[in-house]
Amino acid sequence: MSDKTKFELEFVIHASPQLLYQYIATPSGLSEWYADNVNSRGEMFTFIWDGSEERAKMLKRKSEEFVKFAWEENEDGSFFEMRIIVDEITKDVSLFITDFAEDDEVDEAKMLWENQVSDLKQVLGST
């Protein structure tokens, strides 16, 4: 694996798993909240922020459950995953994020995810 630190975040999202999945697994959904623009060709996704591009491969996905990506440039086995969890009792829907960052960048990476997911909640009307 890597010398990066794995971290996990959980966010309660007031939306159906079906709707939420569209926003985490499709280029049009991801471009609504995650990046300025997202394109895909097969399993390769291109994320565009402020004119710069990053490419990631979708490693795995399961409809209405999760997507898992790895950045093209990384050689360390790290990935980021967005998993939809539905509480069996309350039926609350959560978005569970798993990601990796350098030790000194973990707090910054968590804040970035918090900001991104805040945008997602606004798009979904789930504030």
Image (cartoon, helix red, strand yellow):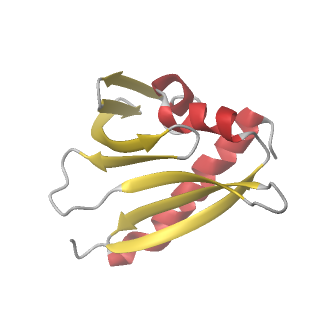
Q: Residue furthest front?
A: 88
Q: Residue at x 58, y 48 (%)?
A: 116
- Residue 67's place in the image compared with 10, above or below, is above
Q: Residue at x 66, y 34 (%)?
A: 18
Name the foreground residue: 98 vs 64.
64
In the displayed structure image, the side of residue 44 where residue 19 appears, left or right: right
Q: Residue at x 28, y 39 (%)?
A: 57
The quadrant where residue 9 appears: bottom right
The quadrant where residue 58 appears: top left
Name the foreground residue: 29 vs 17.
17
- Residue 42's place in the image compared with 106, above or below, is above
Relative image position of residue 48 (x, y in whole percent): 38, 31
Q: Residue furthest right?
A: 90
Name the foreground residue: 60 vs 114.
60
Q: Is residue 33 visible?
A: no
The quadrant where residue 74 appears: bottom left
Relative image position of residue 111 (x, y in whole percent): 56, 62
Relative image position of residue 49 (x, y in whole percent): 41, 35
- Residue 63's place in the image compared with 75, above or below, is above
In the displayed structure image, the side of residue 124 where residue 104 appears, left or right: left
Q: Residue at x 51, y 51 (%)?
A: 82
